[in-house]
Image (cartoon, rainbow, N blue to C red):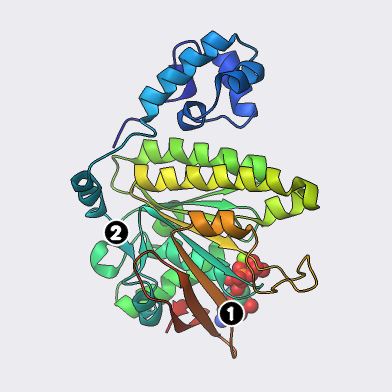
Amino acid sequence: MAERKGLEDLPGVGPATAEKLKEAGYGSIEAIAVSSSSELASIAEIGESTAQKIINAARQAADVGGFETGDLVLERRKLVGKLRFGSKALDELMGGGIETQAITEFYGEFGSGKTQIGHQMAVNTQLPAENGGLDGSVVIIDTENTFRPERITQMVKGLSARNGTEYDIEEFLKNIHVAKAYNSNHQILLVDTANDLANKLKDTDKPVRLLIVDSLTAHFRAEYVGRGTLADRQQKLNKHMHELMKFAGLYNAAILVTNQVMAKPDAFFGDPTKPIGGHIVGHTATFRLYLRKSKGEKRIARLVDSPNLPEGEAIFSVTTEGVKD
Ligand code: GTP
Ligand code: MG
């Protein structure tokens, strides 16, 4: 995997220019690489020819937009890891677990188990492959302030009992890196921070193998209200999703995002089970699962979109010890 460079590594970008670009949401080489010279010139207050040089350098550094041959794609696909849920039914539904190098979206109403699955996966990721993990650490972008270390503790205890091993709870907590996102711009910027962290941990024994964004859409939904702002919102969300996808490829990581359904549909005939973010999120997420509540601890997951798996449903439970059949 390529060495990750910062904006300051681009010729013509000093600290002041880098700062302006970051503030405007152009925090990564990739974002610069796909921007236009006029756009960059006005944001960074530089000449257009300088802007073009910066873009050219960024394109080389980022290696975006090129073709590659099928054998190389296959080579990379061989590295795809599967992260197991701890529920056989869910694992089977997903063909063995959630994949790395992909975005998996969980959507559903409040209390349907999205955040609980996130917590469980933050624990499971740290397990060795033979126990269904990815032997890695975890980054959580927490937009709703719902990360609870106490739940991690309960789940590690549950896992210890299940696997007959005494796992070190402290270790599990130390390998989860949580940041609160205060608004949608901050949320987008935190993917850059996650990149820095992943780069730093890349050659350690616990590289970042899971990135969670819980919730992907809550800030966007709250900030962009009304029809007039919809295009803006979708454009930002689209960019955000692509940066997440890039992260997945760069670090062979699984991306887990959560999304609520529209409780109050905009239109009278709107579908109340439709996820927020519409087709932008839908087309960029590789796998989509719709969660709904059933009796008590029972939950139902429906795989609604996948490039290589049949649609289907799985029943699982959310318990004090975590997610299980
Ligand atoms: P929103 O973020 O509000 O959209 O919901 P969500 O889909 O993220 O729901 P979440 O994953 O937070 O699920 C909450 C539900 O999980 C609760 O209603 C409980 O049913 C269950 N739950 C959470 N903590 C515990 C626990 O410690 N023990 C048990 N048995 N269940 C729990
Ligand atoms: Mg939640």
Q: Which mark is residue 292?
A: 1
Horizontal and vertical percent position of residue 293: 60, 82
Horizontal and vertical percent position of residue 132: 30, 68
Q: Quadrant of the C terminus?
A: bottom left
Q: Quadrant of residue 47?
A: top right
**Residue sitting nearer the eye, 143 or 242:** 242
**Residue sitting nearer the eye, 149 or 262:** 262
**Residue sitting nearer the eye, 179 or 287:** 287
Residue at 61%, 10% in the rendered image? 46
Find the distance from the CA under tag 1 to the CA under tag 2: 27 Å
Q: Circle 2 sits in a helix, a strand or a loop, which is it?
A: loop
In the picture, measured across the screen, residue 7 lies left or right of residue 137, that is right
Tell me if label 1 and label 2 are in contact, CB under 8 Å. no
Q: Is residue 25 visible?
A: yes
Q: Quadrant of the N terminus?
A: top left
Q: Which mark is residue 81?
A: 2
Q: Quadrant of residue 260?
A: bottom right
**Three-letter amino acid code at disc 2?**
Gly
Q: Which mark is residue 64?
A: none
In the picture, measured across the screen, residue 206 lies left or right of residue 157, that is left
Q: Circle 1 sits in a helix, a strand or a loop, which is it?
A: strand
